[in-house]
Amino acid sequence: MIKVMLIAGARPNFMKIAPIARAFDSRADHIAYKIVHTGQHYDANMSDIFFEELGIRNPDYHLGAGGGSHARQTAKIMVEFEAVCEQERPDLVMVVGDVNSTLACSVVAKKMHIKVAHVEAGLRSFDLDMPEEINRMVTDAISDIFFVTEEQGMTNLKKEGKPESCIHFVGHVMIDNLFYQLSQLKKMDSTVLKHSDYKSGHTEYGVVTLHRPSNVDDKPTLIRIFKTLDQISKRLPLIFPIHPRTQKNMEAFGIQPPETITLTPPLSYMAFLNLWKDAKLALTDSGGLQEETTALGIPCLTIRENTERPITITQGTNELVGTSEHKIFDAFEKIMAGNWRTGQKPDLWDGRAADRITDILLAHLQF
């Protein structure tokens, strides 16, 4: 019996561990696991319904890390998680993504001589101004097992000297979850979801998400982005579930979007999926949405200068447009004219990544 601790710190992490938890449940005779919610991002909407929606049980541990600086948050997670490891003595700590919890729990486990597996290993933006890039690099520097979503991740890890025997190209658990949630959406009355009336009231629309500090903390940048969104919304109405950080800075900078941009509070996964899956396009600085739009063939304009997910550009429907008004609007015009590439689903993005991860743990690892 392999004893595993599954770590999640921010809301997107739960979308990534959900398929793994379901796969582990199917092999309960060989794998015992506990879910640890570090509390890095606290969301009042993470109720029993949220986890029921994802098809997983509530977390076994909640560390209550809360906010604060990167150092304070990381330190609190490390202290609390050390106590959990001392009590549970797991064989393996499995972390996902690139948040502070990913780094913190990896360091704790490694110093306690517990094996570490990193899901979404090897992704690189090569931009050290991004906190997530530092988290990715440090986590991969000390991990024992690397589960990779795209071939570039394998290349990066090999260049960094990681043994090929420890690197496993398995596909993407985020896409596993996407397909699972789509199947659940088909079984329900989607009209009960928030803002389904917006969808039914528009023949075409776009969705927007913005939260990265480089975009929303800098006044000239955020004003420039909204000026571009204003221009786009005159041709295509936009719906924008707004991050609290973005909302706060909009108010501080005196930004008042036009009526053609509909602002909403953050949405549940299913409510947002119900919106964007049928959108004309997505404008975002989110890593996950770059991947999910590629999986469903939705045009995506990424408002960033770089991406750690290059396959969404080389094979998918994503394009980096930075924050240039001209570049964003030119790309938008191509989409509206029907001149956007259709893209293709990347290799192994088939909804079975979590099964591969589980098979690898059971077939190849010795504890």
Image (cartoon, grey):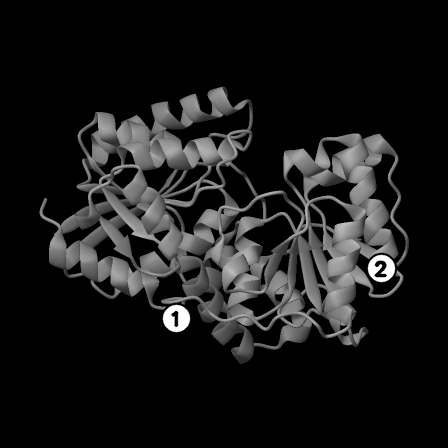
Q: Alpha-carbon neighbours of circle 1 within 10 Å: few (<14), some, or many (≥20)?
A: some
**Picture quadrant of residue 280:** bottom right
Amino acid type shown at disc 2: Ser
Side (left or right) of 17 relative to 284:
left
**Picture quadrant of residue 338:** bottom right
Q: Alpha-carbon neighbours of circle 2 within 10 Å: few (<14), some, or many (≥20)?
A: many
Side (left or right) of 73 relative to 318:
left
Toward the viewer: 156 or 176?
156
View extreme (left): residue: 366
Q: CA distance from mark 2 to mark 1?
A: 34 Å
Q: Are marks 2 and 1 in contact (CB under 8 Å)?
A: no
Side (left or right) of 318 relative to 36:
right
Q: Is residue 168 visible?
A: yes
| Residue pictured at 65% horizontal, 34% vertical | 213
Amino acid type shown at disc 1: Asp
Toward the viewer: 124 or 12?
124
Toward the viewer: 11 or 171?
171
Q: Which residue is mark 1?
A: 350
Q: Picture coordinates of residue 14 (x, y %)?
A: 45, 51
Q: Which residue is mark 2?
A: 233
